[in-house]
Amino acid sequence: MDLASGFLGIGDRTIHAKLEREIKEYFGTKHAFLVSSGKAALFLILAGLKRLTGKKKVIIPAYTCFSVPSAVRMAGLEIVLCDIRPKTFDFEHSKLRELVNDDTLCIIPTHLFGIPSDIAKARDLCEGRRIFIVEDAAQAMGAVHDRKKLGTLGDVGFFSLGRGKNITCGSGGIIVTSSESIADSIGGFVRDLGNPPVAEYVKNIVETVFLSIFIRPNFYWLPKSLPFLRIGETRFHDTFPVYKLTGFQAGLLTGWREKLESYNRVRSRNADFFMVTSDISDRMPVHPSGFPYNRLPVYMDRKSSKDLLCEVGDILGISPMYPSSINEIPEIKECFDHMRYGSAETVADTLVTLPTHVLLNDEDKLKIREAVKNVLKQEPNREPEMRGKVECR
């Protein structure tokens, strides 16, 4: 039915306006923009903010998705890294305070795995200084904190509709804001966007149809083994395409609100199952029950244990998140002059994530639980030094 809606969307001239209206209603914002990816959404936000102030520096977490520095770089802005607290994946706010200055364009707090970042603390640093808060809610669509939807707490927010996100149409991105000046500036760029070339459009449709069949856990080995799909791969892109969301992608999102709420409830239940049955509560940075984790983060004591669990659990969807901290990305490493970000580097070395998506069945969850337990049994002695670094106790 989703695919049928997607194909109907190709010829529906009203579908984008309808989807934008639904998004504004759901998030309670005045403006919404639909684009080709989450990183395209961030690029357009940064381009719009740059046009408003001319400032150059963008502060991001030292451990985050590689798409974030990609978008900053492509917008012609300067990447400024702030170390994180492994317990929350949020900024180390004492260090964030030292980094903010008069040339700071914006701060990008990240709701990693859907875990809320402390937007209020970041906003306090920006008060009266014309520094914008850009919420990276790529992994948090539909999540709520203090009765407010994540993505709506800052000046402007964005979501990803890519594979593995809370809801997906293969790829895509959403920008939301209630600021008239920000919307006007971003809108100027969005209005000039074109549609992807026909070949790219067809490729997107074929990949989406293929994945709709083979993304199920029992068939996951096939798309995972095909290199052109790049499933689970994290890469830094100096440049990337920026287009409008296609009619096919918009059509796939028909009924998205009900699906998103349903999918997030399932993610909450699946996360609770692993927390209760896998003896990992003392290895999690945060562990409230009933939370819609996009993926469930778990710390191992050693990099070797992390690598082993990811190897044995790869076909089950157990994986690391990002291969390194941002300062270790080869393409931009020289920008940071050998600076170290100890907590972010430790997280990259020891973090494993478990799937929580709606296609997991009871057998899948039992296999994942056993894989985790078996690797944990092979860790004979917990390392106090590592425990201190990840601050999970």
Image (spheres, rainbow, N blue to C red):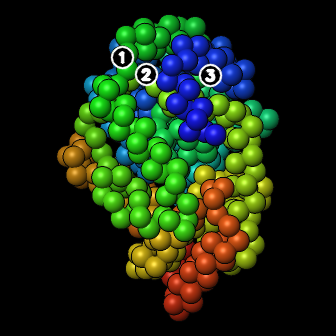
Q: Is residue 98 above or below residue 156?
A: below
Circle 2 is placed at which residue position? 244
Task: Find residue 139 and report its image quarter.
Answer: top right
**Does the image show residue 348?**
no
Asked if residue 135 lies left or right of residue 222, the reply is right
Q: Earlier in the sequence, mark 2 or mark 1?
A: 1
**Does the image show residue 360?**
yes
Q: Which residue type carries mark 1?
A: Gly
- Residue visible at 59% across and 13% down? 14
34 or 120, nearer to the observer: 34
Q: Which residue type carries mark 3?
A: Leu
Circle 1 is placed at which residue position? 194
Percent x, y of residue 329:
28, 51
- Alpha carbon distance from label 3 to label 1: 18 Å
- Residue visible at 22% across and 52% down? 330
Q: Secondary structure at mark 1?
A: loop
Task: Find residue 244 and report its image quarter.
Answer: top left
Circle 3 is placed at which residue position? 19
Percent x, y of residue 324:
36, 58
Q: Secondary structure at mark 2?
A: loop
Q: Secondary structure at mark 3?
A: helix
- Residue visible at 75% across and 37% down? 258
Asked if residue 247 lies left or right of residue 206, the reply is right
358 or 153, nearer to the observer: 358
Percent x, y of residue 314:
46, 71
199 or 37, nearer to the observer: 199
Q: Are marks 2 and 1 in contact (CB under 8 Å)?
A: yes
Q: Which residue type carries mark 2?
A: Lys
